[in-house]
Image (spheres, grey):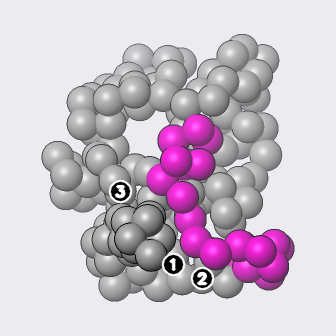
């Protein structure tokens, strides 16, 4: 019983720390994920980290991951590898503007999944990545 609580509690803490509009978006993603996979229970920080750090041949034909631009340390600035533009930290713990505006979050998820994965992300992947970023 303690193991189950220790596993579930951290996930619920991450979900609870989203603002109301973002929580509504997370809930919508959960419904979509459940509709796609009846065994879906919740998003995963661990899966999100794997998605964020895994390397793929991106839309420009070169190997890339989310961390290529945002770095492995989400509390630090990143730098766009194509434009050299400095990217403010993704971690909400050091950048309070992150993961607060649903429209912006959707835009960047769509754009970044297409850049790295050359496709739109699934609801499960998006939720996993949001949980991972929000955990930092």
Residue under the image location 66 percent in, 24 percent down: 55
Residue 23 in the image: state x and y as whole percent: 42, 80
Q: Nearer the viewer, residue 129 or 5?
A: 5
- State the CA–CA distance, disc 1 to disc 3: 14 Å
- Marks 2 and 1: in contact by CB < 8 Å? yes
Mark 2 residue crowding within 10 angstroms, few (<14) / some (14–19) / many (20+): some
Q: Nearer the viewer, residue 35 or 114?
A: 35
Mark 1 residue crowding within 10 angstroms, few (<14) / some (14–19) / many (20+): some
Residue marked by disc 3: 134
Seen in the image, is 28 located left or right of residue 134? right
Which is nearer the N-term, disc 2 or disc 3?
A: 2
Q: Residue furthest front?
A: 1
- State the CA–CA distance, disc 2 to disc 3: 17 Å
Q: Does residue 74 lie above or below 31 as drawn?
A: above
Residue 25 in the image: state x and y as whole percent: 51, 78
Which is nearer the N-term, disc 1 or disc 3?
A: 1
Mark 3 residue crowding within 10 angstroms, few (<14) / some (14–19) / many (20+): many
Residue marked by disc 2: 28
Q: Quadrant of residue 88?
A: top left
Callout 3: SS: helix
- State the CA–CA distance, disc 1 to disc 2: 5 Å
**Magenta-colored segment: predominant secondary structure:** helix
Q: Does residue 75 lie above or below 132 as drawn?
A: above
Residue marked by disc 1: 25
Residue range of the region highlighted in magenta in the rendering = 32-51
Residue 32 in the image: state x and y as whole percent: 72, 78
- Marks 3 and 2: in contact by CB < 8 Å? no
């Amino acid at each position: 019983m303690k193991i189950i609580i220790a596993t579930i509690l951290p996930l619920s803490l991450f979900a609870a720390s989203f603002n109301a509009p973002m929580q509504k978006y997370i809930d919508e993603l959960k419904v979509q994920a459940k509709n796609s996979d009846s065994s879906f229970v919740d998003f995963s920080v661990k899966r999100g980290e794997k998605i964020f750090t895994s390397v793929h041949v991106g839309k420009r034909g070169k190997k890339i991951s989310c961390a290529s631009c945002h770095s492995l340390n989400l509390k630090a600035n990143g730098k766009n590898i194509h434009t050299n533009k400095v990217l403010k930290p993704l971690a909400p713990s050091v950048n309070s503007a992150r993961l607060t505006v649903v429209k912006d979050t959707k835009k960047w998820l769509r754009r970044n999944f297409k850049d790295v994965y050359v496709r739109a992300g699934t609801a499960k992947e998006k939720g996993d990545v949001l949980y991972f970023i929000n955990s930092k």
